[in-house]
């Protein structure tokens, strides 16, 4: 047989822990549609979710009730993905790494930077890949901002980066994300803030100073549901980041102010909504496409033009994971990048508690 016709290697087998929102909407669909990966096993003790797994991925999909059962099959797996509640991330990731398996953890990687660094160090000691699922790096609007900044379309200097994830949810939904128990690692600062901080650090590098405000606005709420973070990056850019569950009218998703022009963009990337509705990315077809009416604008007070939004690219994350496992390249989000994000979130929490600017050693 011609060497060019050699069969492709068998797909990498993935065990997924958790089938709530993160597992069912994001991880399982993206894993199952990524070339070179196959969803092998899903762990969930909830009978209704096990039925959902079979309905969505076939009656022969292996489901297990406990992580211990999954790790007992470690030799039959190539990757573990942890999409369980935040409080379990560290324990489960450590167990998987100790079982000799590479790991993807839904954000945040851990509740503290110390725990995150311990996981990163363990992975490095074992020679195993560890990555955090900061999928919002592949939002269509963020990819557009990256392109504009890289091309110098806003000028030689970016002076302020404004970014928001805002919602109007005046009534509590319940669940661990709204729990006041610190062990749950709930609240918007660690939820939406993880994405906002990761994006800012990805664009502009380390932050040397952090100022934050956090509030509990809704009656009966026990953890932050309205927050603001201001970062001063080592390169001089200032990032202003908002996250809220109580925004009755939403601000722009991005406003980026440069020395020659500004970019303003409203609305949300369409990929999550598409995945929730059952749409799936497929080879040869565009994904994460936004209509022209939703494009942002670039310019100044005298002249502005619409800028086509780049397509969203969530599939790129697991394609990068597959490449990292096959070729030994860095994963699309490294463990140390995830640690840096959590350090900023910890500094933000301290800043809000003590009403002061917190300086960092991240530069």
Image (spheres, rainbow, N blue to C red):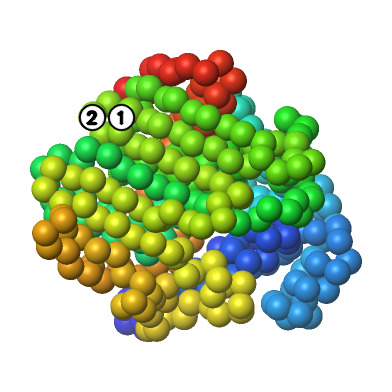
Please identify the quarter of the rendering in which residue 122 is found: top right
Give the CA separation, mark 2 to mark 1. 5 Å
Q: Residue at x 43, y 54 (%)?
A: 251
Answer yes or no: do the residues labelled 2 and 1 have beta carbons within 8 Å?
Answer: yes
Pointer 1: what residue?
233
Position of the N terminus by quadrant? bottom left
Give the residue furthest to the right.
47
Q: With respect to residue 247, does 357 lie above or below?
A: above
Is 64 placed above or below 9 here?
above
Frontmost residue, 332 versus 292: 292
User: Residue 156 appears in which quarter of the rendering?
Assistant: top left
Classify mark 2: helix, strand or loop.
loop
Above or below, 4 relative to 194? below
Q: Residue at x 37, y 83 (%)?
A: 284
In the image: residue 358, left or right of residue 246: left
Q: Quadrant of the C terminus?
A: top left
| Residue under numbered circle 2 | 235
Q: Position of residue 15 (x, y in %)?
A: 67, 58
Spot occupied by residue 127 in the image (x, y as percentages of width and height):
50, 37
Please give the name of the residue rendered at 31% of the width and 51% of the height, measured from the top-left corner: 255
Identified at 46% across, 34% down, the residue is 229
In percent of width and height, residue 298 lies at: 20, 60
Label 2 neighbour load within 10 Å: few <14, some 14-19, many 20+: few
Using the image as rendered, state which of residue 97 and residue 357 is in the foreground.
Answer: 357
* Residue 311 drawn at (x, y percent): 35, 70
């Amino acid at each position: 047989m011609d060497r060019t016709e050699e069969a492709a290697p068998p797909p990498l087998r993935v065990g997924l822990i958790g089938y709530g929102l993160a597992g069912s909407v994001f991880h399982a669909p993206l894993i199952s549609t990524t070339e070179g990966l196959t969803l092998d096993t899903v762990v969930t003790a909830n009978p209704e979710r096990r039925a959902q797994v079979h309905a969505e991925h076939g009656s022969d999909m292996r489901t297990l009730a406990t992580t211990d059962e999954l790790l007992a099959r470690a030799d039959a797996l190539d990757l573990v993905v942890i999409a369980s509640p935040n409080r379990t991330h560290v324990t489960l990731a450590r167990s998987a790494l100790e079982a000799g398996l590479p790991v993807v953890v839904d954000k945040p990687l851990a509740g503290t930077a110390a725990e995150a660094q311990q996981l990163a160090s363990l992975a490095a000691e074992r020679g195993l890949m560890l990555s955090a699922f900061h999928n919002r790096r592949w939002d269509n609007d963020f990819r557009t901002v990256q392109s504009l900044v890289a091309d110098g379309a806003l000028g030689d200097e970016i002076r302020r980066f404004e970014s928001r994830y805002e919602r109007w949810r005046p009534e509590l939904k319940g669940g661990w994300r709204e729990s006041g128990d610190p062990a749950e690692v709930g609240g918007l600062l660690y939820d939406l803030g993880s994405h906002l901080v990761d994006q800012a650090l990805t664009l502009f590098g380390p932050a040397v100073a952090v100022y934050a405000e956090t509030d509990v606005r809704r009656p009966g709420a026990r953890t932050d549901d309205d927050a603001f973070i201001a970062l001063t990056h080592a390169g001089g850019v200032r990032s202003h980041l908002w996250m809220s569950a109580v925004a009755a009218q939403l601000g722009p998703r991005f406003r980026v102010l440069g020395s020659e022009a500004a970019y303003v963009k409203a609305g949300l990337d369409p990929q999550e909504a598409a995945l929730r509705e059952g749409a799936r990315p497929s080879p040869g077809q565009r994904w994460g496409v936004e209509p022209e009416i939703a494009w942002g604008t670039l310019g100044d007070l005298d002249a502005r033009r619409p800028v086509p939004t780049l397509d969203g690219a969530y599939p790129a994350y697991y394609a990068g994971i597959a490449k990292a496992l096959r070729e030994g390249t860095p994963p699309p989000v490294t463990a140390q990048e995830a640690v840096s994000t959590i350090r900023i979130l910890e500094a933000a929490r301290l800043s809000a508690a003590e009403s002061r600017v917190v300086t960092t050693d991240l530069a």
